Image (cartoon, rainbow, N blue to C red):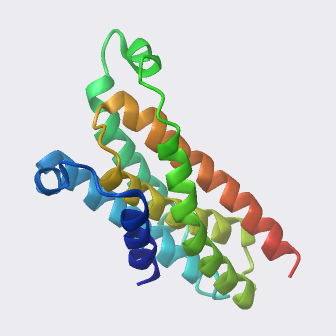
Amino acid sequence: MLAATSALAGFAGFGMRADAATRLVAADFAARACVTVLVILASAHDAIVWGVPGLEPGRYRRWWPAIAWMTWLVLIAAPLFGPDAVGRLFAARSHAHCAWQMALVSVLPAIVLFRRLRASAPYFPGWASAQAGLASAGVGALTVQVVCGIDGPAHYVAWHAAPWLVLTVALAAAGRLLLRQH
């Protein structure tokens, strides 16, 4: 519910892309959105489960959100594979406000998830923080996918995937410090 509220606030504040009505039903767009939602749900679930001592996910289960994120990355980067992949990646037009919009939308879900984790005092604050960071940044990534009008794979890798990864690491580090002080 909070993720939807945060995303809707982002849609209202940043404005929807001009072709949103047609792109939302396109197969490639819908596939990316579905995998993004899967990443958000899996990582938010795991963050909450990591916060309950004794219910931590097993050795293999803890990697599912990361595998879902990598699936999303393959979906967006697959068209880049080829002899000039690096050149096309660096030729992507600068669009830094995608990263800032993603960060702004991620703040509210991060605050709520980390407050929940702090109240539960998880045994493994690093894992719990990483999952909460991935989920929170994922809400921002989903919002930016609907707001941003550029669908090129190089743009997605440079200005959607990279900021999602950076936000996840930053939120995980901040969360770990927050949980350690408890």
Determine the image quadrant of residue 177: bottom right
Residue 42: % across, % down: 43, 70
Front residue of this view, candidates 25 and 117: 25
Q: Is residue 167 left or right of residue 97?
A: right
The percent position of residue 14, horizontal first and vertical second, equals: 41, 57
Quarter of the image for residue 39 reads bottom left
Residue 24 horizontal/vertical position (percent): 17, 56
Q: Residue at x 49, y 63 (%)?
A: 60
Outermost top residue: 83
In the rendered image, residue 47, in percent from the top left (x then y), is placed at 57, 75
Residue 3 higher or lower than 119, as above or below: above
Along the viewing direction, whichever of 173 and 4 lies nearer the viewer: 4
Q: Is residue 105 above or below residue 90?
A: below
Residue beneath the point at 67% across and 60% down: 171
Q: How many numbered markers are drawn? A: 0
Residue drawn 17% across and 48% down? 19
Q: Relative to 126, is 147 on the left or the right?
A: left
Quadrant containing the C terminus is bottom right
Please tell me which residue lies in front, 55 or 116: 116
Would residue 161 appear left or right of 111 to someone viewing this image? left
| Quarter that holds the N terminus | bottom left
- Vertical side of 78 occupied by 5: above or below: below
- Name the residue located 30 percent from the left edge and 15 percent from the top edge: 82
